[in-house]
Image (tube, rainbow, N blue to C red):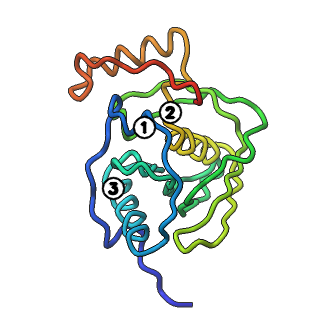
Amino acid sequence: MRNRPIPGSSGLVRAMSLLGDPVLHTPCEPVTDFGPSLARLIEDMFATMYAAQGVGLAANQIGVPLRAFVYDCPDDDDVRHLGHVVNPRLVTADGTTVRGSEGCLSLPGVEAGTPRFDHAVVEGVTSDGEPVRVDATGFFARCLQHECDHLEGGVYLDRVTGWRRARAVRAVRRTPWGRGADVPPPHPRA
């Protein structure tokens, strides 16, 4: 078995798009070019995710409106899941709905109890165009649903309602990056 480089080890850390940036609130385009630029994007996404201490990152979070995300996320049994999906489709989201604390690298410092299914299946391809299917439970299922929402132009805050949403919006407005921000209304697809 050959030694494989650590994802992101040769990538560049890119600037994070924050809540309110139009790229986060617009559905992403399918990837059609599977050349070196896609491999570089995936590498940069890993580097950026690790620098921000995240467990997942969608391409539009670094300003690239393409359907791709990366992840390095544990499940509820603390098993590590590492990979990426290009042109993902959330084919299954079912099981029990669990309201858990959720945050986002594009809303730094803000968390809210967000309902998600405890099982999810995503299908797509790798950066080489090879088919990939990811079957997840627990926290990892939450991660996959979160990243798929990004690619549809949504953020987790779109799924938060009532007093939890009001509290999260107040928290956004108190952050240095969101001071005085006009928080977009919930995205209809999220």
Label 3 sits on what residue type? Thr
Q: Please give left or right for residue 169 compared with residue 102 in the image.
A: left
**Mark 3 and mark 1: span between their CA atoms?**
13 Å
Q: Please tell me how crowded label 1 is: few (under 14), some (14-19), or many (20+) other residues with Cα within 10 Å.
A: many
Evaluate if marks 3 and 1 touch, with contact meaning CB atoms under 8 Å apart.
Answer: no
Q: Position of residue 174 (x, y in %)?
A: 26, 18
Which label lies toward us, 2 or 1?
A: 2
Badge 3 is on which residue?
Answer: 48
Badge 1 is on which residue?
Answer: 104
**Which residue is at the far bottom?**
1
Q: Position of residue 127 (x, y in %)?
A: 52, 69
Label 1 sits on what residue type? Cys
Task: Provide the secondary structure element on which disc 1 rests.
Answer: loop
**Mark 2 and mark 1: span between their CA atoms?**
12 Å
Q: Closest to the observer: 13 or 65?
A: 65
- Residue 131's label in the rendered image is none
Q: Please give left or right for residue 44 compared with residue 153 in the image.
A: left
Q: Closest to the observer: 100 or 125?
A: 125
Task: Provide the secondary structure element on which disc 3 rests.
Answer: helix
Q: Position of residue 67 (x, y in %)?
A: 51, 52
From this view, report whether residue 93 is shown above or below residue 129: above
Task: Provide the secondary structure element on which disc 2 rests.
Answer: loop
Badge 2 is on which residue?
Answer: 154
Q: Please tell me how crowded label 3 is: few (under 14), some (14-19), or many (20+) other residues with Cα within 10 Å.
A: many
Q: Residue at x 27, y 54 (%)?
A: 14
